[in-house]
Amino acid sequence: GTANGRSWTRVASALVDTFDVIAPDARGHGLTDAPAGEYSFTTLGNDLAGFIQVLGLDNPIVGGASLGANTVLSLVADHPDIARAAILEDPIFFLQSPEATQHWIATAVASLRAEAISLANLGLDGTVERFRLANPHWSDAELENAATAKLQVRDVFFTTFRDRFDWQAMLGRVHCPVLLVTGDPERGALVTAEAAAVAKRCCPTLEVSHMPDASHNINSDQFDRYLAALRGFLSRVS
């Protein structure tokens, strides 16, 4: 929920010889404005649709991780003709009611806000070192990008974000090819094998790529496997 466009630097660098890669910051994140009003996956998906239209992008392939994955799902469900394909990296797909998911999201956002306040007191260098302790295998660039992104999220996002997010119903409205990338729930990934199976039933055009031993931060934990899965999917839909 706190990453931004810079979080995709390593992935973008690996793809830039073949694709034009654009990695925007969501509202309230990075260098994007943080207007007052509703913050939800629907709002963020509509923002992304506007971004695509203003740039005149013709059926781009869109992707995101965590909150960004839910944003991408909102985009392709509510704007069915806008994207050629979608990549969802460990979205918030829980096998419980939308109301229970809403409660989980509210709790998670409150926790992220408390963390952001704590990290602000550490500053950038202190936040980088905190992240290094938790993720010793990450590169210096990944650590700095993650720390910078965490410190740039504005408080209005934390205090106003609300969403009940019926992901199964939304997947039922998606007709483009979808790659769902999952990690290891025992290491903190969100999407279970059971939820991934439900996702496939909801959306016949969806395929699953599982990354063993990956946490919620799949593309950092299993970069080579992730990139191979991404390139395979992109070659099929390009």
Image (cartoon, rainbow, N blue to C red):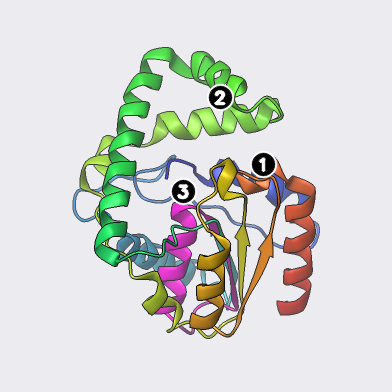
Mark 3: amino acid: Asp
Circles 3 and 1: CB atoms closer than 8 Å? no
Q: Amino acid at mark 1?
A: Ser
Q: Which circle's residue, 1 or 2, is located before the other in the chain? A: 2
Q: Kindly report the distance in space between the C-alpha atoms of the residues bearing marks 1 and 2.
A: 13 Å
Q: Is residue 174 above or below residue 26?
A: below
Helix, strand or loop status at disc 3: loop
Does residue 9 appear to the left or right of 35 in the view shown? right
For marks 3 and 1, the one nearer the N-term is 3
Q: For residue 34: magenta?
A: no
Q: Amino acid at mark 2?
A: Phe
The Cα atoms of the two marked residues, 3 and 2, are separated by 21 Å
Q: Quadrant of the C terminus?
A: bottom right
Name which residue lies at 79% across and 68% down.
Answer: 232
Occupied quadrant, residue 236: bottom right
Q: Is residue 192 visible?
A: yes
Going by the image, does 181 lie left or right of 55? right
Magenta-drawn segment: 64-87
Residue name at image x 27 percent, y 35 percent = 155
- Numbered mark located on residue 220 in the image: 1
Of the residues under marks 3 and 2, which one precedes in the sequence? 3
Alpha-carbon span between mark 3 and mark 1: 19 Å
Would you identify the image quadrant in which residue 204 lies?
A: bottom right
Query: Was residue 82 drawn as part of the magenta stretch in this picture?
Result: yes
Residue 78 picture location, percent across and down: 38, 78
**Residue 66, image x, y percentages:** 49, 52
Packing grade of label 2 (10 A; few <14, some 14-19, many >=20) is some
